[in-house]
């Protein structure tokens, strides 16, 4: 199991051919980056001691989603992600050069009826408002894909609101839209 997953973006700068360097790896960057913006960040797997880094990002996600959860559910969610024996739920944090939280993602691994390998569901993604448009969301999704590849998952997938145009601009550069999601809420 992955105990420490890290990507360091030494410099994220929009250039004419729209590439970004991650330890010599190349990937596209979002069109909404402004020229010359750069950000140092580190993507790491959530560990038991990361609650104080994760909690404000989680609350930002809940506020953005207009959701509220009990402190018990919040703590249980964190404990599942941080517990190495609970392998179906993982979490990643994006931290700046000083170790402050920039963003977080929650990941669920589950079996598939179509493949022998698990699938990876990116359940929650949040980037702090001050860090948006600087490649944090892309770096977190790339980190999810790296972890999913390491775990031999056959697919990473997620959903977003149709009205979330900012996020969809990024997602449309990274993945194909393939399904509609229907849901029936069983408990309020």
Image (cartoon, rainbow, N blue to C red):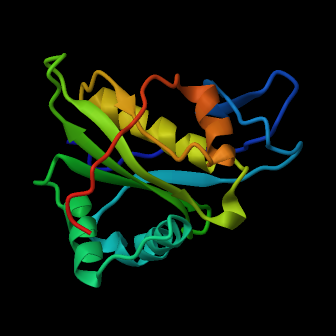
Residue 163 can be seen in this image: yes
Nearer-the-camera pick, 73 or 57: 73
Nearer-the-camera pick, 150 or 130: 130
Q: Residue at x 30, y 74 (%)?
A: 74
Q: Position of residue 51 (x, y in %)?
A: 35, 74
Specify the quadrant of the image occupied by residue 119: top left
Q: Position of residue 123 (x, y in %)?
A: 37, 48
Residue 8 can be seen in this image: no
Asked if 75 appears above or below 19 in the picture, the reply is below
Most distant residue in the left direction: 85
Most distant residue in the bottom direction: 71
- Picture mark count: 0
Q: Residue at x 54, y 68 (%)?
A: 99
Asked if 39 appears above or below 22 in the picture, the reply is below
Asked if 148 appears above or below 76 in the picture, the reply is above
Left or right of residue 78, residue 94 in this image: right
Q: Residue at x 29, y 30 (%)?
A: 150
Which quadrant is home to the C terminus? bottom left
Specify the quadrant of the image occupied by residue 18: top right
Q: Position of residue 58 (x, y in %)?
A: 44, 69
Left or right of residue 81, residue 112 in this image: left
Q: Residue at x 73, y 50 (%)?
A: 133
Which quadrant is home to the N terminus? top left
């Amino acid at each position: 199991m992955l105990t420490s997953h890290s990507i360091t973006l030494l410099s994220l700068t929009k250039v004419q051919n729209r590439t970004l360097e991650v330890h010599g790896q190349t990937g596209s960057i979002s069109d909404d980056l402004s020229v010359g913006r750069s950000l140092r960040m580190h993507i790491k797997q959530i560990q038991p001691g990361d609650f104080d880094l994760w909690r404000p990002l989680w609350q930002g996600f809940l506020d953005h989603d207009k959701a509220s959860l009990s402190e018990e559910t919040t703590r249980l969610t964190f404990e599942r992600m941080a517990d190495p024996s609970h392998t179906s739920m993982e979490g990643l944090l994006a931290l700046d050069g000083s170790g402050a939280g920039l963003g977080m993602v929650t990941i669920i691994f589950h079996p598939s009826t179509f493949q022998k390998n698990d699938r990876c569901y990116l359940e929650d993604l949040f980037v702090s408002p001050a860090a948006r448009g600087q490649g944090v969301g892309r770096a977190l999704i790339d980190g999810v894909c790296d972890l999913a590849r390491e775990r031999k998952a056959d697919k990473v997938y997620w959903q977003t609101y149709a009205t979330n145009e900012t996020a969809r601009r990024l997602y449309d550069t990274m993945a194909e839209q393939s399904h509609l999601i229907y849901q029936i809420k069983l408990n309020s």
